[in-house]
Image (cartoon, helix red, strand yellow):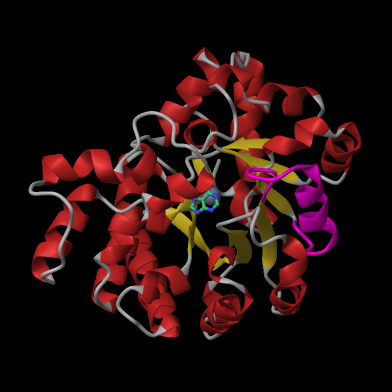
Amino acid sequence: MLGDLPAVDIHRHLDGNIRPETIWTLAAKHNIALPARSLEALLPLCQIQDKTADLLAFLARLDYGISVLADVDACYQIAYENMQDAQQEGLDYVELRFSPYYMAQTHQLNIADVVAATVQGCADGERDFGVKHNLIGILSRTFGTEACTQELNGLLAHKAHITALDLAGDELGFPAPLFVNHFKQARDAGWQITVHAGEADGPQSIWNAIELLGANRIGHGVAAREDEQLMAYLAEHHIGIESCPTSNYQTATVVDTPNHPMKQFLEAGIEVTLNTDDPGISAITLADEYTVARDVIKLSDEQLKQVQINGVNQAFLSAADKQSLF
Ligand code: ADE
Ligand code: ZN
C-alpha cells in the first residue's frame, strides 16, 4: 500500500469485523454462552487460519459475533469500533457494509433500530477518528426473499444514510432472479448497487447481477475469468471488481492464492480494487492484502498502484469527494 495514495477499502463487512475482545466482553455483559472458556480459546473458533470447505462454512464463523448483539447499543459499539479499526489501519476512506436482518436476528431486535444504531456508530466514529465512510446495506439472501423484504424496508427507513445495496450470503442457493424487485426499489431510492457474484457460482451469476439487478460493481467476481466476453464487458462499462484474495482462499473460491485472477483481470483492463471482506474473521488488515497481492499474486508495482487508484475511482463518492482524498 503506497503512503502517497489514498488507502481505501470498499468491500468490508462490519458484522464480519467484530473484535474477538468485544465478542468476549459483550457475551459476559449479556450472559450469553460461548463455546469457549477463555478469549484465547475463542480465537480459533471466530477466526480462520487456513481455508474452510466452502462459502457457507466460512460464513458460519460470523455467527459468534452476531450471537452477542443483544441490543442496539451492541450494534452501535461494533460500528464505532469498526471506524476506530479503520483509523488504526491507516485508511482514508472505508465503505462498511452490514446486514441488519442478520444482526437483528438472534435477539429479535427491530431491524430499522439496528440500522439507526449502526448509522450513528459510524457517524460518531468518523467524527472521533477522522476516517471518511459510507454505508452499504446488505440483503442476506441466505434467509430468503421475505426476510430480504423486511431487511430492505429497515434500510429504506434510513434511506439518506445508506449509499448502496448489496446482495450477500448463499449465492448458489438464492440466485439473483429472486431479488429483481428488491433491487428495483433500491435503484428507485437512488442507491448504487454492488452484488456478491461469481464467488460461489459461475459467470452467469455475474451477468445476472449486472443485467437483472443493475450492479455498478461486483463483489469478488472470480468466475469472470471463465468468460472472456464478460471480462470485456466489465472493462468497457467500468464495472469494478472488489477483490478480496484472502477471503477467496478461505472460502475455497480459489484453489490457492497464486491462482487468484486479479492479475488476469487487470490485464483485461478491468478496474480491480483490493479489499478485506471480513477482516475480523480472516485476521487480516488491508495492508496485509497489498502484501499478498505483491508477494503471492505477483502484481507489479505499476499494477499495485493502479489497484489503489481503482479503489478511489470505484468508490461510491462524488467526483469532488474522491478528489478530496488525495
Ligand atoms: N457475507 C460476509 N462475507 C461474505 C462473503 N464473502 N460472501 C457472501 N456473503 C458474505
Ligand atoms: Zn463480502
Considering depth in this image, is 173 or 82 the residue closer to the camera?
Answer: 173
Find the residue positioned furthest to the right.
229
In this view of the protein, which residue sits in the foreground, 77 or 102? 102
**x and y, in percent, of residue 34 in the image:** 17, 57
Point 75% across, 79% down: residue:
188
Q: Residue at x 39, y 68 (%)?
A: 123
Instruction: Identify the image quadrant of residue 111.
Output: bottom left
In this rendering, position of residue 194 left or right of residue 125: right
Quarter of the image where one finds residue 326: top right
Asked if the magenta segment contains residue 205, the reply would be yes
Residue 129 visible in the shown view: no
Q: Is residue 202 visible?
A: yes
**In terms of depth relative to the viewer, which is nearer, 131 or 264?**
264
Percent across and percent down for residue 270 are: 77, 34
Which range is magenta? 197-215
Q: Is residue 56 above or below residue 235?
A: below
Total labels drawn: 0
Res. 274 image quadrant: top right
Does 222 lie within the magenta span?
no
The image shows residue 1, relative to residue 73, as above or below, that is: above
Seen in the picture, residue 215 relative to 294 is either above or below; the reply is below
Q: Position of residue 145 (x, y in %)?
A: 63, 75
Q: Position of residue 250 (x, y in %)?
A: 47, 34
Q: Residue at x 39, y 28 (%)?
A: 50
Is 56 left or right of 194, judged from the image as shown? Answer: left
